Amino acid sequence: MEVAQVLHMNGGRGEKSYAENSLVQRKVISITMRIAEEAITNIYCSTFPTSLAIADLGCSSGPNTLYAVSELVKAVDEVRRKLGHQSPEYQVLLNDLPGNDFNAIFKSLAGFQENLKKQMGDGFGPCFFAGVPGSFYCRLFRAKSLHFVHSSYSLMWLSRVPEGLEGNKGNIYMASTSPPSVLKAYYMQFQTDFTLFLKCRSEELVAGGRMVLTIFGRRSQDPSSKECCYIWELLAVALNEMVLEGTIQEEKFDSFNIPQYTPSPFEVESQVKKEGSFTIDRLEISQVNWNAYDNEVHQSAAFEDGGYNVARCMRAVAEPLLVSHFGEAIIDEVFSRYGEIVASRMSKEKTEFVNVTVSVTRKG
């Protein structure tokens, strides 16, 4: 599987799109935004640049893409007004893989900028936007051209499916039944990718530049723990049912593995220290319910079905990967079963995503 070619969230604004099914990710951004705001105002106050370059890596498409950016810009503008400074010019660089729905972002920019100007009032900006397609596991920007890098729920995706997963039969990800060699292969791929990511960003950030990364992760030292792998284990159950019924070929199922690694805070800290270009300012854990609509007030009865909500969210994320491997014919059935399985498990146990957030500064 060529991950860079097939990994993208479902585009458009339809019922199955990421734009309509990304409330979990928005909640994660909201929960961790205070860390990002602290970091970006610190870099602004330490240098008072006349122009501020902000990169959002793994920006996807939909409302979350510009939500994070708007909150960051507002935080800087509030500080500079209090200090009586002129507004810097903002350069916002939105990155994701080439399959991302950049057109949807570009179409929404005019309205977004108009609203931003109204909210911020006179003396704000200007604010320039650019889309930057490409993998963040390579260089994306000019040397020493960025002041701030933000990424949320993107860095758990690996650049490739790890090698040596032949013994992972019956699973599509790390699981309690995965042999140690599979867990090691996933961890080694994460180490390689995250180190490369840090090296590339260290070359692109100015000295003293800041970076805040939030990654779907885990508290446990066990990489196959339920808190990070259960969501995929349940998808494997749905696929396995269809294998037993003959709808999916067993060889197809056994050769499918999710290119993701959910690190612990210790693993993130270790790699940052080992790579050596950054100092760690904050390292925090948060959590969010699997069902984004939990505790939300909605008119529609459909939103009360937690399994349905989680299945829609996961479909928006995983459908392109599944289609590229299994074809389109099975997708509706897979996620219908998945929703029922998830609903059953959610009624019996607490289900949360764990988020690892690290805030770092580029060494001088």
Image: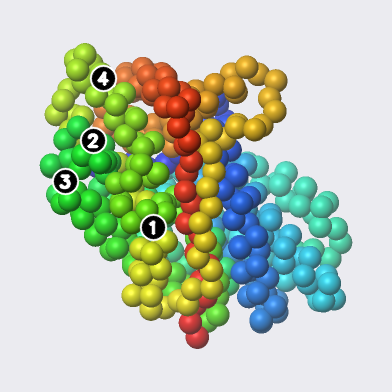
Instruction: Residue at 44%, 69% (x, y): give it.
Output: 201
What amino acid is at disc 2? Asn
Q: Which residue is mark 3?
A: 179
Q: Which mark is residue 241?
A: 4
Up-down: is 176 above or below 201? above
* Secondary structure under the numbered disc 3 in the rendered image: loop
Marks 2 and 4, how far apart at CA: 12 Å
Is residue 115 among the parts visible in the rendering?
yes
Q: Nearer the viewer, residue 325 or 231?
A: 231
Q: Residue furthest bottom?
A: 364
First in residue order: circle 1 vs circle 2? 2
- Residue where numbered disc 2 is placed: 171
Report the number of numbered marks.
4
- What residue is drawn where x is 60% and y is 32%? 294
> SS class of the residue under badge 2?
loop
CA neighbours of label 2 inside 10 A, class few (<14), some (14 to 19), many (20+): many
Please tell me which of labels 4 and 3 falls first in the chain.
Answer: 3
Question: Tag 4: residue type?
Answer: Glu
Figure quadrant of residue 300: top right
Q: Nearer the viewer, mark 3 or mark 2?
A: 3
